[in-house]
Amino acid sequence: MIDRPALADFLLRRREALQPEDVGLMRGHRRRTRGLRREEVASLCHISVDYYARIEQARGPQPSEQMIASIAQGLHLSVEERDYLLLLAGHQPPARGTAGDHISPGLLRVLDRLDDTPAEIVTELGETLRQSPLGVALVGDATAYTGPSRSRGYRWFADLSSRDLYLPDDHPAMSRMYASGLRGVLGRRGPNSRAAELAGLLSEQSEEFRSLWAEQTVGSRPDEIKRFNHPEVGYLELNCQRLLDPEQSHALLVYTAVPGSSSYERLQSLAVAGSGASI
């Protein structure tokens, strides 16, 4: 059963403990609020201020598991804190030891400080969980996909238009990399995993995937240099650095250009434009 008073008190304490800079927000000169404002938390959690206020006031409907997960992410809770929040809300936490969508607070703090750099946090299946503003400008809002299409590797084979952002000469190597990466995840997670489900779907839909899958290739690593054909600024050659969170099987991808290069200048232009193409 939901423990409304304990849930409300826990949320209040966590909100008051966070400072704007902890979650990538600017601190105003005249700020007097202790911790974050309710409207700031609601924005971070992608819910209405009224809905969040009712939960913190121990009233309103029982929040769903998805809503609690969104609140936990917005408040930068650890996995342990998220599980406790789920229990207070009357839900059973997910089993540990499996890959999930909850991003660790440390990884979020790093991303929050990358407003001027294309960056994103992805799962082991290539599902984008969070992007920096310039990350959205580079590849579009990759968090908006649902179902199997959340996986970039799935989209690569199931929707060929997803390749438009990349140079045709790079497509064969990228296809091999995505198939190899999916096989590696399947090996770690087993035949009943989401990786196995994606492999089954792609085997039905893509002849290219079936051919690559039959090769049993594992360990094809992505190139550090990523080449983009962006519809607004043209050719971009970017270095891609990966910061891994082994506990959550997430990676923070950060894209940078060599200072003084044409790609660097075009990336600055993209930052000004503030919009990008969908993949």
Image: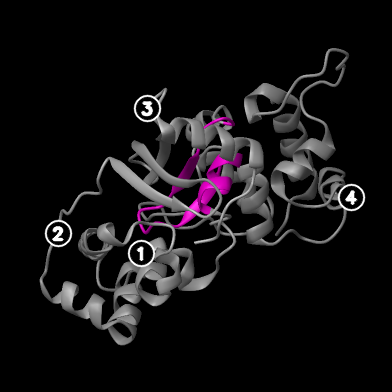
Q: Badge 1: few (under 14), some or many (20 or more) residues near its Cα, within 10 Å? A: many
Q: Is residue 42 left or right of residue 235?
A: right
Q: Whole-percent x and y of residue 35?
A: 77, 24
- Under mark 1, the amino acid is Gly
Work out how far the residue at label 4 is from the one at label 1, CA to CA, in angstroms. Answer: 38 Å
Work out how far the residue at label 3 is from the one at label 2, CA to CA, in angstroms. Answer: 31 Å
Q: Please tell me whether mark 2 or mark 1 is closer to you in this view.
A: 1
Q: Earlier in the sequence, mark 2 or mark 1?
A: 1
Total numbered labels placed on residues in the image: 4
Q: Please tell me whether mark 3 or mark 4 is closer to you in this view.
A: 3
Task: Give 174 or 72, whichever is nearer the viewer.
Answer: 174
**Residue topped by disc 3:** 258
Secondary element type, mark 4: helix
Q: Please tell me whether mark 3 or mark 2 is closer to you in this view.
A: 3
- Residue placed at 62% from the left, 59% from the top? 91
Q: Please tell me whether mark 4 or mark 1 is closer to you in this view.
A: 1
**Residue topped by disc 4:** 50
Secondary element type, mark 1: helix
Secondary element type, mark 3: loop
Please say whether residue 130 is visible from this viewpoint: yes
Query: What is the magenta range?
Result: 115-139
